[in-house]
Amino acid sequence: MRVPVTFLFLALTLAGFIHGPVLGKDVAREPIESDSASIKGVVLDENARPLVGASLMLPTSGFGTITDDRGRFVLRVPAQRDLVLEIRYLGYRTERRNLLLRVGELLPMRVQMEPSVITVQQGVTVEADRDRSMGVAKIDPLVSRRVANPSGNFETVLQAFGARSQQEFSSQFQVRGGNYDENMTYLNGIELYRPVLMRSGQQEGLSLIHPDLVEHIHFSAGGFDARYGDKMSSVLDVTYRQPRYASGSVQTGLTGFSVAAEGLVDREGKWSWQGGLRYRTLNSLLQSMDTRGEYRPTASDMQMMLRYQPNERWQWNWLSHAGQNVLGVIPSNRETVFGTVKEALQLRVYFDGQEAMKFRNATHGTSLIFKPHPRMTLTQSASLYWSDERERIDVESAWLLNQLDANLGSDNFGNVLFTRGIGAFQQYARNALNISVLAAEHRGQWQSGTGPHFVQWGLRAQRERIQEYLWEYTLVDSLGFSIAPVLQVPPLGSDADTVVQVYQFLHADQAISSQRYSGFVQDQIALDQEGRWRLNAGIRFNHWTFSGETVWSPRVNLSWKPKWSKDWAFRLAVGRYAQPAFYRDARFPDGRLNREVRAQRATHWVLTADHRFKAWDRPFQWVIEGYYKDLTRLIPYEIDNVRIRYLASPPVEGYAAGLDLRIHGEFVSSLQSWATLSWMKTSERNEEIGWMPRPTDQRVQFAMMFQDYLPPYPDYKVSLNLVFGSRLPYGPPDFARPKDTLRMPPYRRVDIGFSRILWGAGTQKPLFQGRLTRAFRSAWMNLEVFNLLQINNTISYTWLYDTQGYQQNVPNYLSGRVLNLRLVLEW
């Protein structure tokens, strides 16, 4: 009997990725008949939707079956014989699996078929590997539901595709040297936005995307084409399912619950709907941190989608989302031990006061799709984004910095020897921000009948209104003296003659009303009759009335799929990516608007080699991608937790270069796994010290998401999410970039989840029977362990000062080890 690698963590990390044949060995079950075995599974299309009526056949023996209305099948086959199973569906390439099963064996199987020719959403016929030629990764949406994920946001799976994140509370991520503001996210063609005022991940709330409603996910880490908008780093394009029948799911656990449902309104299927409701609390995670107190974190949202399609020529869609995140904190004390073996230090902080944040947002969108011709699609859409962010902070703190006894032979080991410094600080804020973005867009596409062209175009008009009130200061005190720099600030609502001496002060009372106009045109051309050479060339423009600047972004993508015995594809992408400021990057640290701000620019050079192959009769993909980004007109910034502070420094130039290696496939039959190793360097030229690392300069990252099951019981599954990130630069919070040359400790995190199928979903031994099993077609229970190894990962630093100008940086750690229990029911 084999030992599952994921239950032995060290063996998994060292051998699991290499010794796939061991992990892929078949699972023995009780005999069904004396001379037979069974296959049980599901057949899916390229977007992970079930294929109804797919044919499964053993040509040599005549055994066969077809899939049901959920794509599922059970097939009894002869045992102890070499067999070839053929899976066929009209319009899809035939899949073949070689089998040799033992008597009584039950083999789980998940088949995802590749179309020979497919029809995209708007009905234009194109070849199936178009996304591959454009360097866009397709991600199985089911994986985001299985992986152990403390935030509950599905963006966690992007770490296996080049994204980087060191914050388990947040859905924010960095891509190839860029920051959080340089990523673009679409949901059903609507551009999404994130909160602006947030200081830490626990303030962010839920990602707008509901994982249980997703049909397919496309992600590009660079070199994307002109149809995607004006960001410098990446694009995430998510589409919800089109309902075919009534179904849904309920998830509940120690961190909250979620509900998703969908169905048809009429028998003809012209009207369909989807809906979702989520609630999350991070209280258990926050209680594991160094700062003790009373936490009241809640995040909730609801969304609804309607679709009406009276015939093949017309389709109308509507999407509405409303969310709220409330965080109340009454801190009491904090104790953090840090330093080295020879010099161990302890910070003790006593708090008085509270913090209260409330972020509300709503997104609405509608689209009308018209096909005047089988090869032409026209889409008219409109969307509205609204947010109201409020922040109230009034916290006083008194701290002691103690020296600990680090002598292992001492009777006083670990106790306080003496106090090195004392001080106090006060943080006060009354901030409010209101944003509304109204957009209207036209998009079209046309496929030539007998020619090689696939043309797409679009025009977009957008109106923005941003209103902000900021009043925030920080007072730093040591031994009764206010630490320089000292600013004279009148308290809010006080007499003008009364002043308070503070260390930092931020004040703004302003509104921005502006318009943006953008558009693009691109053509994908098959350069030969077989479509092995493809050229995608396009250009987009953007004009922002606030700055009066118009930018142009030409982009070219050349792909080649050689006629080799092995399935290889190569891609070269070159393009310019101009990113006009939105709001945060158009504001100085003191709150003033920068009316001279210009669009940041990046030129991407991306070279990709993509190899698809089969090992142990299961599909795999190996991707090697090298890139170089030439960066100009960069706005310097600092990162504190997830808060980005753009500086008043002049624009600078920089670069990012790196190499990504990724493999994903079924290391275990019917279960998808990923592993990515990335090297990257990004720097900018500072006018004082020359070239220096950017705040996102993380040289090495390794990310792995691995799934396995426990033999001889495949109803017991395990998923493991491992992330290692090398040291990130940081510096004191004084808006002086030349000082940001220190490095944080490496980021190391392991989350693991164990699940048991209770009934349905292919299980042979259901644990329950009765009314509940008839009401819900399947159920499973998950036990998740977050931060399995109890590693103190650093997200930022608290800086202490004394009257002599002494500075001490104290790490702020993320959450510790936390358990979560989750129940999932589906109907």
Image (spheres, grey):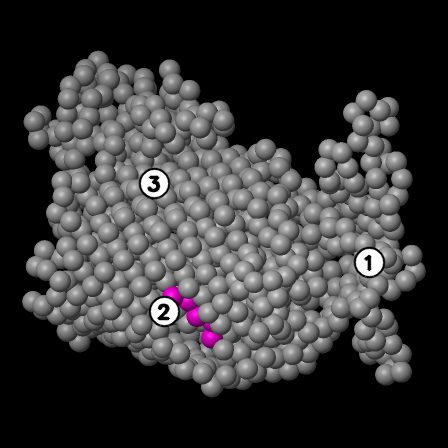
Could you tell me which secondary element the residue under label 3 belongs to? Answer: strand
Spot occupied by residue 499 in the image (x, y as percentages of width and height): 87, 76
Say which quarter of the image contains residue 313: bottom left
Q: Residues within 10 Å of mark 3 (few under 14, many from 20)?
A: many
Q: Earlier in the sequence, mark 1 or mark 3?
A: 3
Residue 452 placement, left or right of 687: left
The residue located at (89%, 39%) in the rendering is 418
Report which residue position mark 1 lands on.
805
Residue plotted at (53% across, 78% down): 597
Note whether residue 128 is visible.
no
Q: Is residue 401 above or below residue 4?
A: below
Q: Nearer the viewer, residue 234 or 301?
A: 234
Give the percent coordinates (x, y) of residue 181.
Answer: 51, 64
User: What's drawn in magenta, residue-wise?
Assistant: 599-603
Question: Quick one: 625 or 126, which is closer to the camera?
Answer: 625
If you read the primary sequence from the N terminus, does the residue marked by circle 2 or circle 1 appear first? 2
Looking at the picture, which amino acid does disc 3 mark?
Answer: His
User: Which element is circle 1 on?
Assistant: loop
Q: Is residue 363 above or below residue 158?
A: below
Residue for badge 3: 664
Task: Tell me the distance, in whole angstroms, between the alpha carbons under discs 2 and 1.
Answer: 45 Å
Q: Main secondary structure of the magenta part?
A: strand
Q: Nearer the viewer, mark 1 or mark 3?
A: 1
Q: CA distance from mark 1 to mark 3?
A: 52 Å
For disc 2, the marked residue is 576
Depicted 456 relative to depicted 757: above or below: below
Tell whether position 169 is magenta. no
The answer, for residue 334, to whether it is visible in the render is yes
In the image, is 62 to the left or to the right of 19?
left
Q: Do the numbered discs 1 and 3 sit on residues whose CB atoms are within 8 Å?
A: no
- Give the amino acid type for the residue marked by disc 2 in the picture: Arg
